[in-house]
Amino acid sequence: MTEYLTALDAATRVRAVDEIGVPLGPGQPVAFLHALGERDAWTDLTISGALLVDLFAVLTKPNVRLLSGFFGPAERFLRDSGADVQFVPADFRRFAPIVRMRAPRVMATLVAPPDRDGYVSLSLHAGATVDELHRAGADPDRLLIAEVNAGAPRTHGLPPEHPHRVHLDEVDIVIESDRPLFTLADAEPTPAEAAIARHALEFVADGSTLQTGIGGVPSQVAKLLAEGDGGDYGVHSEMFTTGLMELHKAGKVTNKTKAVYPGVSITTFAAGTAELNAWLDDNDAVAFLPVDIVNAPDVIARNHNFVSINGAIAIDLFGQVIADTIAGQQFSGIGGHEDFVAPSGLDLSDRSLLCLPSTASVDGGTISRISPSLAAGTIVTTPRHQLDIVITEHGVARLRGRTVRERAVALAQVADPRFRDDLLGAADALR
């Protein structure tokens, strides 16, 4: 029988030795996680999730650890403050089998208010936890906790196979919350990012299906496309952003040319402004599907004229990409990076754009993000053979089908002019 409890009362149902599974980012039950911080005397509590949306006090308690598949500012702050925060290397679609393997006794998620039939939408997140939520609800030895937030948008999947909802009869504990939803403002692009976005437009034709990540470049690309003359775009993107909403509102998205799930924009989670959350409410133009479908390379590759736009921290002349660590320390996560970069090589109509400013500021100085080679011990996010297009503010490097030396020269030529001659010399030595 479903119980209706306060967040504090629900927190008492967690054992001193226990494991809790929560979704990535916008799907997290914030009131419940904060309520856990009111308790002490944990013996061995593990919380599995990714991209925390707040600093939760429970993670500062003795004998509590967080297993995160994607670090954000909260994970980095907690780790650097001494909390037991550990990274689980996996791309986003592999989170699904990992959560099934771990089978946390407690699964908890944010949901929208119930409809008249007793179903609650999973709102801003499908991700890797959908199946495990249903399994926990069906298992009498496990707990399924649904945090109903009155402000959470009711979003849709593609029923009957992917309805993106659970019924209250499946839920063991319901918490009601009025906490503000997580929002993410669009970053104002730097001059370098604005220049990169202008270069990227060359590769987006009418009817292209788009995937965009987070940050100044993707948001600026979406803005330029919304203001431009093109259209008939499709969307198949791990993350649905405010920029993609603006593209919809400009009438540029029809999804009619997509080979996979035509007529609807596909995503697995949404993060953006409060306006985005309101626009998504009961909007069947966007469908939320589990990440192991959205990020599956074979599904992505079936969409012709697919253009993915992603970022990186650094790259070497061989094309090896660092996208989730800095100086060997975990900074973010793998997410869908490789999944969306890789399929572009399977069809000549598809393009993968890897975008990064040519320099970075470190300790008051300027360094090149393009280096002759990666230092020993560097952690590679995406291997060299999967790259297609690399864009900096200085231009475009086309890597597909080129030799090692040709690729290195192309990358050196889009480096900052202050470092270009040295990089060209290093490229010339490659054979």
Image (spheres, rainbow, N blue to C red):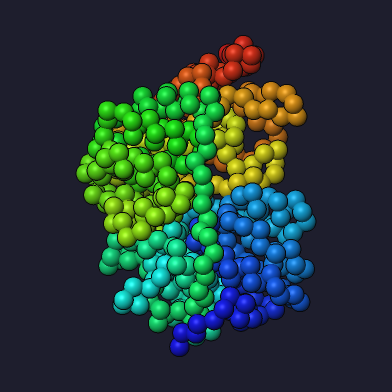
- Answer left or right for 422 relative to 189: right
Residue 160 visible in the shown view: yes
Q: For residue 420, which quarter of the picture?
A: top right
- Tell me where residue 138 appears, x and y as whole percent: 44, 81
Residue name at image x 38 percent, y 76 percent: 167
Which quarter of the rendering shows the N terminus?
Answer: bottom left
Residue name at image x 52 percent, y 34 percent: 188
- Answer left or right for 40 relative to 397: right
- Tell me where residue 56 appears, x and y as whole percent: 66, 62
Residue 400 visible in the shown view: no
Q: For residue 250, which quarter of the picture?
A: top left
- Tell me where residue 179 appears, x and y as whole percent: 54, 64
Nearer the observer, 419 or 216: 216
- Tell me where residue 396 appears, x and y as whole percent: 46, 21
Looking at the image, is 235 positioned above or below residue 145? Answer: above
- Answer left or right for 32 relative to 385: right
Which quarter of the rendering shows the C terminus?
Answer: top right
- Answer left or right for 40 relative to 312: right
Looking at the image, is 289 positioned above or below residue 15? Answer: above
Residue name at image x 21 percent, y 44 percent: 256
Looking at the image, is 21 positioned above or below residue 318? Answer: below
